[in-house]
Amino acid sequence: MPTITTTATPPSHRRRPRATARHIAPLDGLRGLAVLGVLFFHAGHFGGGFLGVDLFFVLSGFLITGLLLKEAADRHGSIDLAAFWERRARRLLPALTVMIAGTLFLAAAAGPPYLLGFALEDGPWAALQATNWHFISEQVGYWNDADTRVFSHLWSIGVEWQFYVVWPVVVAVLARGRAARRLVPVIAAVGAALSLTVMIALAHGPDTTRVYEGTDTRAFSLLLGALMATAPARRLLARVPGRLAGGLCAVLVCTLGAYWFLTDGPGSPFLFQGGLFLHALAAALLIALLAHAPAGPVGRLLGSRPLRWLGGISYSLYLWHWPVYLLLSEETLGFGGWGRTALLVPISLAAGFLSKILVEDPIRFKARWARSRTGTVCLAAVLAAVAAACLFIPAPNQGADSVDLTRLTAASGVVPGV
């Protein structure tokens, strides 16, 4: 993929290292809180925990846009899209691919027939980053069918990947000129407003899967995060004194926390008529303020070591927790409630930690075995395992052993996946 540039730049600029952002510890803590919400939502203990996914979206839009704009400033208006996508792929795809392959084999070895059957059907879509549109087109209800599909949580990964394909191109084109670069916040704001409009227009009927999982209807969370990373927003926040910024962070954290505790699934009033949008806007303001003044009381709390550790493994933890929850169901374990949660959460944490240290970090930071030919062979082997699992694991015969999925969903203590 060619690099988008404005003018021919001297070799010294072309060899300039890629832009890097300063590390903001409280944002790691926000990731930790987001994934905690998801874990307890899925365990059936926290009705508003699914909003953690929205927090992930806002964080992604903010961080990715900040990196792109910094690269454009450092490289005189050019953004190396090929390098950007290569970094995203190295960061996210290996852990995802290993999880898909591992889950397929675990479902074949120990899962009930219906779980394996749906996993084989959904696996290729998960690998293509299109799980959300697959479920929408197949009318797989998010709120009532997700606990039969081990890859149902990957809808959000699909939304992020689709954003990563489109938004960097928009920023790269606009970055070619200083005047055009000023349009980035305008397009982010207009895009967020259009996304909200589409959500409100489509949010009708008993099933809200289309608006909840659609890339177009969830783009406002990513775009509001992107808006807060632009120069006008940063200049405006730079005028806020540190003490006032700390107070605003406290107010926003309390507001977001209250909304999480008051929200209880799709029936919550106003959720799809503006509630999700306002939640994302408050989250975007909090993130931008934490980036501006990370040393305040809220920043220190979110930057604490336990929350930062959780944030560090949040991606792999998110990938693995849902297959763990479904494979270790109440029917399998023979017990539910908090006892089951006390077992599932540590297992999920262990799976996320092992994925990070054995897969994510070595490939992301180019460990010796992950470089050059060895890394290519490892990636090819895992991709081959996914393909082999989808092609050669026999689909289960669900005749006599089939289950009434409606009864299963109604009876299960597991809350549908986010």
Image (cartoon, rainbow, N blue to C red):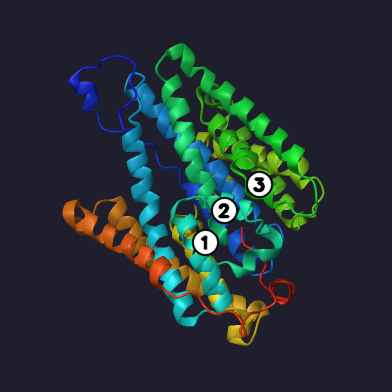
Provide the residue designation for mark 1. Answer: 122
Q: Secondary structure at mark 2?
A: helix
Q: Residues within 10 Å of mark 1 (few under 14, many from 20)?
A: many
The answer to whether 160 is drawn above or below residue 71 in the figure is below
Residue at image position (60%, 75%) is 341
Q: Residue extending furthest bottom? A: 334
Q: Is residue 210 left or right of residue 9?
A: right
Between discs 1 and 3, the one toward the N terminus: 1
Q: Is residue 112 left or right of residue 267?
A: left
Displayed quadrant of residue 342: bottom right
In this view of the protein, which residue sits in the foreground, 114 or 353?
Answer: 114
Q: Residues within 10 Å of mark 2 (few under 14, many from 20)?
A: some
Provide the residue designation for mark 3. Answer: 253
Q: Is residue 277 left or right of residue 232?
A: right
Residue 102 in sight from this viewpoint:
yes
> Can you give x and y, in whole percent of width and height, for residue 248 in the image?
65, 37
Residue 294 in sight from this viewpoint:
no
Between discs 1 and 2, the one toward the N terminus: 1
Q: Nearer the viewer, mark 2 or mark 3?
A: 2
Provide the residue designation for mark 2. Answer: 134
